Amino acid sequence: MAVPKKKTSKARSSRRKAVWKREAVFSARKALSLAKSILTGRSRSFYYPPAAEVPDEAEE
């Protein structure tokens, strides 16, 4: 079983957590920005098919 050779310092572990959280914040900002651009219709870099109307089966 793998075990660490030395105890990880608080500075190193907090730095790793900060990097991980920063990456998560960046991804969240990017996703929110993409969602906003799609909703406003100003998206140029993201292609998605237009919504096709689905006929209701209850109306038949």
Image (cartoon, grey):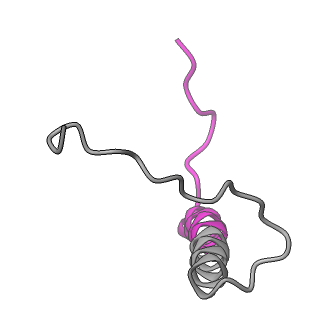
* Chain part drawn in magenta: 1-24
Q: Which image quarter: residue 18?
A: bottom right
Q: Residue furthest left?
A: 58
The residue under the point 58% across, 84% down is: 36
Give 7 or 13, whichever is nearer the viewer.
13
**Measured along the vertical axis of the image, is residue 34 above or below residue 40?**
above
Q: Is residue 23 magenta?
A: yes
Instruction: Single out the residue that lies furthest toward the front.
Output: 60
Up-down relation of residue 5 to residue 51 (above or below)? above
Which residue sits furthest right? Answer: 45
Q: Main secondary structure of the magenta part?
A: helix
Write the residue at 74% across / 86% down. Answer: 42
Residue 8 relative to residue 49: left or right: left
Q: Quadrant of the C terminus?
A: top left
Q: Nearer the viewer, residue 30 or 55?
A: 55
> Is 31 left or right of 59, judged from the image as shown?
right
Residue 5 versus residue 12 in the image, above or below: above
